[in-house]
């Protein structure tokens, strides 16, 4: 029976590596050096000025929520908080939105959790994702008035992704996905940013879960991964094609069967909350503990991250969003 399961995973995994860019011309300009500097500024604020952002530090969760909200306010991007109770205090998801027309046909959600696990400042997990989320919003907002696009993008910063809230009704993404499902919110694709800042370049430094080690995956951790379920296969392919337009960021895609339950590690973030509600969703990741030895440790600090890598991810995300013309 075990090998039947292995065979199913290998046949449906949909593994692929982008080996060439479909186009190398720029459709927009991004100052990569400035973007890298801004990413570091966010990491400095989240991991050094604020610090640990766990359920044991509710004041720091509040400070992070306010920092994210103020970022959008300062750029005149529509933003609001969606609070809910947890234990004896209140937590909140932060929701911002950029629309390029009055009645867009496509509605996407770019999400990332802003809390950290207890005992760590969580640079890669998950301040890196919040930083990329914010800088993607900055760049997308700069396109307004310069490009005609038929889309709206919600930027949702989720609270309480980490234990002990993970997998419970208190998990920020579960709260949001339940509300979206009840209100029949149109979400054509949810993109979850989960640990997107760590690279390693020594052969053999990149690991994989069983049975994916039987595939010819890269042995170095210098790529970004896109993971989707079968329901999200078309969305995964569209993201992958857009990312392939950026020759400076290698990308690997993976489609998993049965909601990812045969590979439990691919469910360990906010995208699974949307999978479980029937939405198309993907996780974009540096592969977390399969690459980063500092996962959930005090050593997960900002000096260990690759900011050029993160800036390239911002660029790849812009390739995807800017591809939706009327």
Image (spheres, helix red, strand yellow):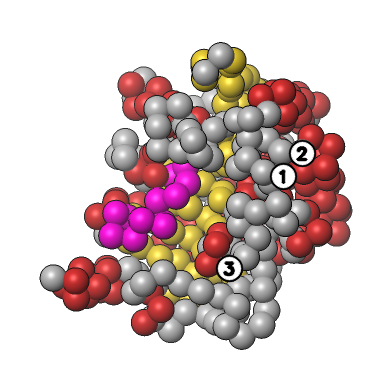
Q: Quadrant of residue 12?
A: bottom left
Q: Are marks 1 and 2 in contact (CB under 8 Å)?
A: yes
Q: Secondary structure at mark 2?
A: loop
Range of magenta residues: 260-271
Q: Residues within 10 Å of mark 2 (few under 14, many from 20)?
A: many
Q: Nearer the viewer, residue 153 or 324?
A: 153
> From mark 1 to mark 3, how far is it between C-alphas?
18 Å
Q: Give residue 121's mark.
A: 1
Q: Earlier in the sequence, mark 1 or mark 2?
A: 2
> From mark 1 to mark 2, how far is it between C-alphas?
5 Å
7 is higher (above) or lower (below) than 90: below
Indicate the quadrant containing the N terminus: top left, top right, bottom left or bottom right. bottom left
Q: Of discs 1 and 3, which sits in the foreground? A: 1
Q: Residue at x 51, y 74 (%)?
A: 207
Q: Is residue 320 magenta?
A: no
Q: Secondary structure at mark 3?
A: loop
Q: Give residue 222's mark.
A: none
Horizontal and vertical percent position of residue 240: 48, 63
Horizontal and vertical percent position of residue 212: 38, 74
Q: Quadrant of residue 118?
A: top right
Residue wearing tag 3: 291
């Amino acid at each position: 029976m075990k090998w039947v399961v292995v065979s199913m995973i290998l046949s449906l995994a949909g593994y692929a590596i982008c080996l060439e860019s479909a186009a190398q011309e720029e459709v927009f300009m991004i100052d990569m050096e400035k973007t890298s500097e801004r990413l570091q500024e966010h990491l400095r604020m989240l991991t050094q000025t604020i610090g640990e952002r766990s359920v044991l530090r509710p004041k720091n969760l509040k400070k992070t929520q306010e920092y994210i909200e103020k970022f959008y306010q300062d750029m005149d991007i529509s933003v609001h908080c969606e609070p809910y109770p947890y234990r004896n205090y209140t937590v909140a998801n932060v929701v911002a939105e950029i629309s390029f027309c009055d009645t867009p046909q496509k509605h996407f959600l770019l999400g990332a959790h802003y809390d950290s696990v207890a005992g760590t400042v969580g640079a890669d997990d998950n301040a890196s994702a919040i930083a990329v989320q914010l800088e993607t919003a900055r760049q997308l907002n700069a396109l307004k008035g310069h490009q005609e696009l038929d889309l709206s993008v919600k930027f949702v910063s989720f609270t309480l992704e980490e234990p002990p809230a993970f997998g419970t009704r208190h998990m920020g993404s579960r709260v949001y996905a339940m509300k979206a499902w009840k209100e029949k919110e149109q979400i054509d694709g949810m993109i979850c940013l989960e640990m997107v800042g760590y690279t390693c370049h020594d052969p053999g430094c990149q690991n994989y879960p069983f049975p994916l080690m039987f595939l010819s995956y890269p042995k170095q951790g210098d790529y970004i991964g896109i993971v989707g379920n079968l329901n999200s296969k078309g969305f995964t392919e569209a993201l992958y094609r857009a990312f392939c337009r950026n020759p400076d960021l290698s990308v690997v895609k993976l489609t998993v069967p049965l909601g990812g339950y045969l590979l439990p590690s691919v469910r360990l973030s906010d995208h699974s909350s949307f999978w479980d509600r029937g939405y198309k969703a993907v996780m974009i990741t540096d592969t977390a503990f399969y690459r980063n030895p500092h996962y959930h440790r005090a050593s997960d600090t900002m000096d260990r991250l690759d900011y050029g890598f993160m800036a390239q991810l911002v660029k790849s995300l812009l390739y995807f969003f800017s591809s939706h013309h009327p």
